[in-house]
Image (cartoon, rainbow, N blue to C red):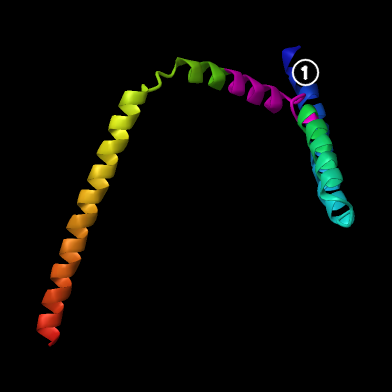
Amino acid sequence: MNVKAEAKDSRFDLVKWLVVAALVLVAVVGNQFYSAEPILYRVLALVAVAAVAGFVAFQTSKGRAFGVLLKEARIEIRKVVWPTRQETTQTTLIVVVVVLVMALLLWGLDSLLGWLVSMIVG
């Protein structure tokens, strides 16, 4: 019985994805067709059509899976231990110092090689 329910769900998912594609196409063509209208109205219309398309997309099985992924990602972000201000400052200073040292080393190597080539070439 579960297989039949999934088969029906996938059939309706295809229809829903076709509706999403049609809405996106209508938004793109409508934006081009109404290019003479003020940008505010076109943006509001695009946002409204995108909201409807997103709502329809979230009604599919892949859309629901994407929603679960977003919720899980938010939970994982809360678990991250963010560095303190002092750690961030120290790490930034280390990176800046290393970049400056490498820049000076490369400048010196470039100058040395340039001087050697000019000595050989004459």
Percent position (x, y) of residue 18? 82, 38
Residue located at (28% from left, 31% from top) = 90
Question: 88 or 3, which is in the foreground?
Answer: 88
Name the main secondary structure of what is drawn in magenta. helix
Q: Is residue 103 above or below residue 69?
A: below
Q: Name the residue under label 1.
A: 4
Q: What residue type is labelled 1?
A: Lys
Percent position (x, y) of residue 80? 43, 19
Task: Write down the region rendered in magenta.
Answer: 56-71
Q: Can residue 14 be seen in this view?
A: no
Residue located at (14% from left, 78% from top) = 117
Percent position (x, y) of residue 94? 25, 37
Question: 55 or 3, which is in the foreground?
Answer: 55
Tell me, yes or no, whether the highlighted magenta stretch contains residue 9. Answer: no
Question: 45 or 111, which is in the foreground?
Answer: 111
Residue located at (76% from left, 11% from top) = 1
